[in-house]
Image (cartoon, rainbow, N blue to C red):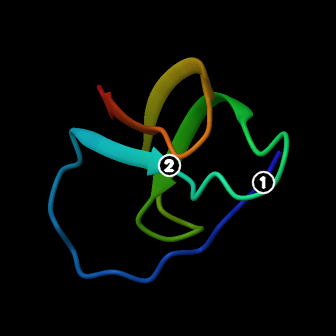
Amino acid sequence: MSSFIVRAVDVGRLVQVVVGHDGKGPGSGWFLKHVHVKEDKDAPETYVFTCDKYVLSALTLNIKM
């Protein structure tokens, strides 16, 4: 499991996230089960985007709710 903190402006209710990587290095792909997004660590609401796919070389996934 990996966690990332991303600072961004408030964009309102989320309906989609875009996930990808640069594809550098052998075996750079990874399996993405789901993405959880919270406004801050203590926020009661969590947006959950289910993917259940491999993110392969320089592939970008658009995951919708």
Mark 1 or 2, nearer chain start = 1
Eye-nearest disc, 1 or 2:
2
What is the secondary structure assignment of the residue under circle 1? Answer: loop
Q: Residue at x 48, y 39 (%)?
A: 59
Q: How crowded is mark 1: few (under 14 residues within 10 Å), some or many (20 or more)?
A: few
Quadrant of the rendered image containing residue 11: bottom left
Q: For this view, does 35 lie left or right of residue 25?
A: left
Residue 46 in the image: state x and y as whole percent: 46, 45
Residue 35 in the image: state x and y as whole percent: 54, 40
Three-letter amino acid code at disc 1? Ser
Residue 1 in the image: state x and y as whole percent: 83, 45
Q: Which residue is drawn at 33% across and 80% down?
A: 8
Residue 47 in the image: state x and y as whole percent: 40, 41
Q: Residue at x 46, y 47 (%)?
A: 19
Q: Residue at x 44, y 31 (%)?
A: 49
Q: How crowded is mark 2: few (under 14 residues within 10 Å), some or many (20 or more)?
A: some
Residue that lies at the very extreme toward the top in this rendered image: 52
Spatial CA span between label 1 and label 2: 14 Å
Q: In this view, does 31 lie above or below 18?
A: above
What is the secondary structure assignment of the residue under circle 2? Answer: strand
Name the residue nearer the viewer: 22 or 45.
Answer: 22
Judging by the rendered image, the residue that carries numbered circle 1 is: 2
Quadrant of the rendered image containing residue 36: top right
Q: For this view, does 13 lie left or right of residue 49?
A: left
Name the residue nearer the viewer: 27 or 60.
Answer: 27
Q: How many marks?
A: 2
Quadrant of the rendered image containing residue 24: bottom right
Three-letter amino acid code at disc 2? Gly
Q: Quadrant of the C terminus?
A: top left
Judging by the rendered image, the residue that carries numbered circle 2 is: 20
